[in-house]
Amino acid sequence: MGSKAFLGLAAAMLLGFCPIGHLPGHSLEDLIGPEQAAAILAGEKPLLAQFRDPRSRLSPRHDVLRGHIEALRRDLDPSVMVETLHIYQKPQPVENAAWSAEEEARLYNNLLALSSLAGLQYYSASRGSMRIFYETSFVIDGPSSKNPLPDPAYARPQAEIRIYARQKDLTFGDNIYQYDYYTAPGAIIFVQQNLTPLTVGIIPAVGKDRLRSVVAVFDAGNYLLVYAASMARAVSFPGMNDRLGNSFANRAEAVIQWFSAQADRALGK
């Protein structure tokens, strides 16, 4: 789905004409099916890495998200894709109550706060210890000038916005990224795209514009459902797909930790 088609659909949904997808407050079963919902509520943490003809297999049943992911996949023709699901239990939940407008706005602004990614840590299984994910992270005014800006904030979620960030992580180094944020009823979605080539040490890993990371947050009654995926077309190099798969799994873990902290602040947990 192209950006214009996505925007048109999102605008129609925001105006109340909702031809596809789910409405706010739908259950986990609506979004991921009863078996997957039962498994994730029982403590399972789905994580799927694919290297041959990668396709989305964990994405929630939300047509806007699925159309967007499929468009990205067709554009990239990725050689590796990693997906994960996570649930966040709302504090003091009211039975099947959707998030309030105030809660949604706070969560939206917290997800725009890319500076909060700096210092984020994750557990590295290969090293057996905690490791910093993003050493630095801040919003900039553009990919060329790169002047730092404060995190943006809005009185209410916007249908679509684009921001740029400079982020230094311990795997891919110091790079410039584009973030596109979208909203639909009961959902906040954002897509990260690399505007500079990614390297692992001195080894080229992913070319410019060849990485997409997607995070989608859905209001699911007493829970928030989080879907995270990273896909890339790796540079042809022995073992690079496996290395990227491990890196993307760590990235997903770190993003989930970051989201949980941002949700705690937004929802007063």
Image (cartoon, rainbow, N blue to C red):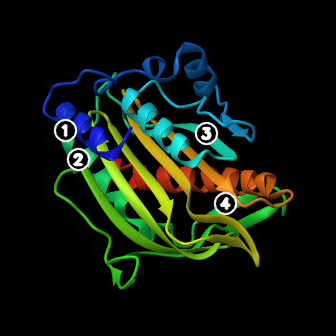
Circles 2 and 4, Cβ within 8 Å, touching? The answer is no
SS type, badge 2: loop
Q: Does residue 20 appear anywhere in the picture?
A: yes
Task: Indicate which disc, 2 or 4, sits on the residue closer to the N terminus.
Answer: 4
CB atoms of marks 2 and 1 within 8 Å: yes
Residue wearing tag 1: 11
Q: Which residue is mark 4?
A: 122
Pointers 3 and 4 in contact (C-beta within 8 Å): no
Which residue in the structure is indicated by mark 2?
A: 159
Quarter of the image that includes the N terminus = top left
Residue count near mark 3 (Cα–Cα under 10 Å), binned few <14, some 14–19, many ≥20: many
Question: Residue 85 at x, y = what percent?
Answer: 57, 36
SS class, disc 1: helix
Q: Do residues under tags 2 and 3 come within 8 Å of each other at their CB atoms?
A: no
Lower sequence index among marks 3 and 4 = 3
For residue 138, side relative to residue 12 (left or right): right
Q: Could you tell me how far apart the alpha carbons at marks 3 and 1 are, in whole angstroms? A: 28 Å
